[in-house]
Image (cartoon, rainbow, N blue to C red):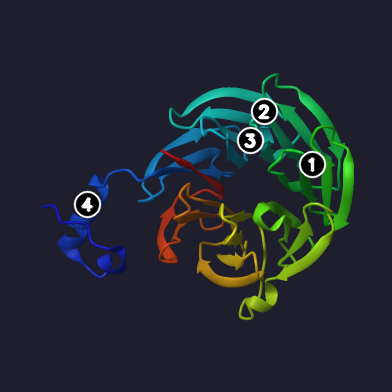
């Protein structure tokens, strides 16, 4: 017996045979418009899911403790930082085939891909370095000393500026992308975790995990101009945090994973106010937007879940149990 697909808003109210029929409907549904890759730092895999249904489609078996992941500009390569294996892996994301392994220095936790796709800027966490990797030759071009435990890292849209955070010193470091020369250093909130360029506002955002703030810098002068404080926006939460961030292409909607606050907040970049929030699993570290920006994917490490948020209806669409410790997500158009 096959039963037509029902809207999720009332699907779960059905029972018995009807629910079985709906499960069959899910199984027969055409694949959605995107694939989602979720790094799992405990299971040493990257999970592959259908972004629309949450259906699991496979895994990439990686080196030890995969955390940061990113796609090449054309979507043909998925880069994975296997931090405990001291390497970055290049995968064909559609064929699930390992293409190349790069020696990436000690403990490459996260990295940023240059806009031209030719270089990676790597946060080598346990040696307090940011390094530049040339993807054609596989050589480390330069290394720059920064504060202890660098993690968050991003490169400007024009490829000229690299910005990295140092968790233990609560500092953010601005570097020349070509040479690694230090341009400026600034104090931010405790345990800074991510960097986000917001081109429509000519701003750089730096999130603070323990303080629950986002410090906003002018992207031209590199001077701090404002602080977005999430704590008063969530008076009922005992532990307000700010971790990985993302922004839509038109600059109208920004999102921040709230770590052990177990949710994702949406912020209006123009007013810098919280618009709404979405419940997620436990310890939500990493997020990503679907290529068409109709969904948001949030990885929660302590509950082993990926939360799929419908950004059209502004509600949680699905929660997928993955196990392990999902760290972050990256979405690719099929």
**Which of the two labelled residues, at mark 3 and mark 4, occupies the earlier sequence position?**
4
Instruction: Give coordinates of residue 276: x percent, y percent.
Output: 54, 71
Whether residue 159 is visible, yes or no, is yes
Secondary structure of residue under mark 4: helix
Name the front one of labels 3 and 2.
2
The numbered mark at residue 126 is: 1
Instruction: Give coordinates of residue 205: x percent, y percent.
Output: 72, 57
Quadrant containing the C terminus is: top left
Residue picked out by circle 3 = 82
- Crowding at dot 1, Cα within 10 Å, few <14 / some 14-19 / many 20+, comes out as some
State the CA–CA distance, disc 3 to disc 4: 37 Å
**Which of the two labelled residues, at mark 3 and mark 1, occupies the earlier sequence position?**
3
**Which of the two labelled residues, at mark 4 and mark 2, occupies the earlier sequence position?**
4
- Which residue occupies the foreground of this view, 305 or 197? 197
**Which of the two labelled residues, at mark 3 and mark 2, occupies the earlier sequence position?**
3
Instruction: Give coordinates of residue 319: x percent, y percent.
Output: 42, 58
State the CA–CA distance, disc 4 to disc 1: 48 Å
Q: Is residue 329 left or right of residue 226?
A: left
Instruction: Give coordinates of residue 240: x percent, y percent.
Output: 66, 70
- Crowding at dot 2, Cα within 10 Å, few <14 / some 14-19 / many 20+, comes out as some
- Crowding at dot 4, Cα within 10 Å, few <14 / some 14-19 / many 20+, comes out as some
Residue picked out by circle 2 = 118
Secondary structure of residue under mark 2: loop
Name the front one of labels 4 and 2.
2
Secondary structure of residue under mark 1: helix
Residue picked out by circle 4 = 25
Which image quadrant for residue 182?
Answer: top right
State the CA–CA distance, disc 3 to disc 1: 14 Å
Name the front one of labels 4 and 1.
4
The answer to whether residue 153 is above or below residue 91 is below
Q: Residue at x 66, y 58 (%)?
A: 243
The numbered mark at residue 49 is: none
């Amino acid at each position: 017996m096959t039963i037509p697909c029902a809207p999720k808003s009332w699907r779960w109210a059905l029972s018995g045979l009807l629910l079985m029929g709906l499960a069959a409907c899910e199984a027969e549904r055409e694949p959605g418009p995107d694939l989602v890759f979720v790094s799992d730092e405990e299971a040493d895999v990257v999970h592959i899911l259908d972004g629309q249904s949450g259906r699991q489609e496979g895994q990439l078996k990686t080196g030890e403790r995969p955390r940061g992941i990113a796609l090449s500009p054309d979507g043909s390569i998925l880069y994975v930082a296997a931090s405990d294996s001291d390497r970055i892996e290049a995968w064909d994301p559609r064929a699930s085939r390992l293409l190349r392994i790069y020696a990436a220095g000690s403990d490459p936790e996260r990295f940023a891909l240059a806009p031209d796709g030719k270089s990676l800027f790597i946060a080598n966490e346990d040696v307090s370095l940011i390094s530049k990797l040339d993807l054609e030759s596989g050589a480390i071009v330069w290394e720059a000393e920064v504060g202890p435990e660098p993690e968050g890292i991003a490169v400007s849209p024009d490829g000229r500026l690299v910005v990295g955070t140092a968790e233990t010193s609560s500092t953010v470091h601005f570097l020349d992308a070509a040479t690694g020369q230090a341009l400026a250093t600034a104090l931010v909130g405790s345990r800074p975790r991510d960097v986000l360029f917001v081109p429509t506002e000519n701003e750089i955002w730096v999130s603070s995990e323990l303080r629950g703030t986002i410090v906003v810098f002018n992207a031209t002068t590199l001077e701090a101009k404002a602080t977005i404080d999430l704590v008063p926006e969530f008076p009922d939460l005992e532990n307000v945090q700010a971790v990985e961030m993302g922004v839509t292409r038109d600059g109208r909607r920004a999102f921040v994973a709230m770590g052990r606050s177990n949710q994702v907040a949406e912020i209006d970049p123009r007013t810098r106010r919280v618009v709404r929030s979405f419940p997620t699993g436990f310890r939500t570290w990493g997020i990503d937007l679907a290529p068409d920006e109709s969904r948001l994917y949030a990885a929660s490490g302590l509950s082993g879940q990926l939360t799929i948020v419908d950004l059209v209806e502004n509600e949680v669409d699905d929660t997928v149990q993955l196990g392990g410790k999902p760290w972050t997500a990256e979405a690719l158009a099929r």
